[in-house]
Amino acid sequence: MPAAKLFFDADILIKKAVKMNLPDDAVRKALKGRIFSGEISVAAFGKAAWTMAKAACDELGARIKRGVVITKYGHSQGAIPGMEIVEAGHPVPDANTIAGTEKALALAASMDEKDELLLLISGGGSALFEKPLPPLTLDDIVAVNKALLASGADIVEINMIRKRLSSVKAGRFALACAPAKVLAIVLSDVLGDRLDSIASGPASPDLSTTDDALNVARKYKLPLGDMISYLAKETPKSLSNVETVITGSVRTLCKSAADIAGEMGYKPYILCSDMNCEAREAGRLAAAFARQIATGDGAFHRPCALILGGETVVHVRGAGKGGRNQEVALAAAEGIAGLNDIAVFSFGSDGSDGPTDAAGGIVDGSTAHNLNARGMKLLEYLENNDAYNALKAVDSLIITGPTGTNVNDLTVILAL
């Protein structure tokens, strides 16, 4: 019964935390009472693009002239009046990405100094909004993205490379909108809310340097070939036509989770909101905290909820299927084996963990035993980056479907 209650409570916490971090209200609040000097157009891209665009249309109504919404496949929830909706590839761009971006660029080119673009940005925008710098092709960008995602680089490092190969990243899209003004409303999925990294900063001056980008390429031994020359070209460092409002972040997600856990009878502790390490190391850290709770010798006593927010990375070495949150959970399962009344779960707030249909995973003290009983060796699955199939075998995947938001990841240790 305690294990069932932990899984039940985790499900409630996930659903409520996601609901509290939907961008609808924040977008409406940012727009309420705002005076626009000319015609309003909308460009929205990212995993939460549909939700944000719908909220903007609900708030501004007929004042919006037209718009383009680019989101991940399956993340659109239907037609929005006046909006052209394009679903495209993520985490790797595809032909629809280019087509949708061209529509947004055409929109930008049609505006003059009296007009204003409402730019709605959310996580996932780096893949979903892209036009390669000529003469680069989509195939070039796809190859670089795949190498970056498998390298173990964090999102800031990844986007340092992406933006230098792009016609729309690193503030270049805002330059394309000039002389029109741009109001950017940003849902942050980047630690520290670094604007030049969220969706690779299409309306933000680039804070990184050519040396930074070249160092990333060397650090991860990226197979860039002739594309290395693009890293030596400087990016825009100032913009005069942009105002930016940040509407949410992983810090708000952690705070929401803590409030919900407290209402459920757990003593909540937010340990950090900037976790940035290998996924399996994060899982082992979570297991270490769980063991400390189990001994009763540390600072945390049952019932409690230990909360860590952030974004881990996976250095892909195997040929399995999974995502960073699933890998966190599977790594934690090894360390909490045999512990009673403790569960660890990790999930992406967008409902999509890596190239899978799962948002993450949840494990308890019996997970490792249950895998062994099926002849499945936990460490072998972990080494093969095959957390999805291991967790699926013991009914430990978290599947939410697209959530309509994207404010990074949450890892929680629940103890009764």
Image (cartoon, rainbow, N blue to C red):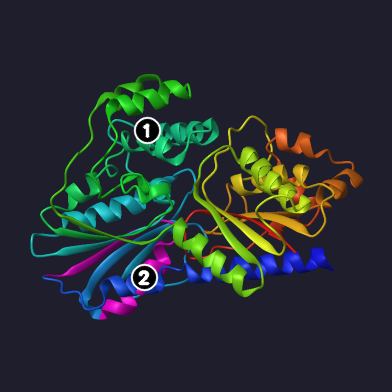
Q: Which mark is residue 68?
A: none
In screen coordinates, is 317 left or right of 246? right
Report x, y in % for residue 386.
71, 40
Check disc 1 and report its element: helix, strand or loop.
Answer: helix
**Is 179 placed above or below 26 here?**
above
Q: Which residue is mark 2?
A: 26
Which amino acid type is shown beneath numbered disc 2? Ala
Quick one: quadrant of the C terminus? bottom right
Q: Nearer the viewer, residue 382 or 111?
A: 382
Report x, y in % for residue 178.
13, 52
Is the residue marked by circle 1 packed among few (<14), some (14-19), or many (20+) residues within 10 Å? many
Q: Nearer the viewer, residue 416 or 352?
A: 416
**Residue 137 appears in the rendering:** no
Count numbered badges in the picture: 2
In screen coordinates, is 311 left or right of 195? right
Q: Nearer the viewer, mark 2 or mark 1?
A: 2
Which region of the structure is painted magenta? 38-61
Q: Nearer the viewer, residue 4 or 262?
A: 262
Is the residue marked by circle 2 packed among few (<14), some (14-19), or many (20+) residues within 10 Å? many
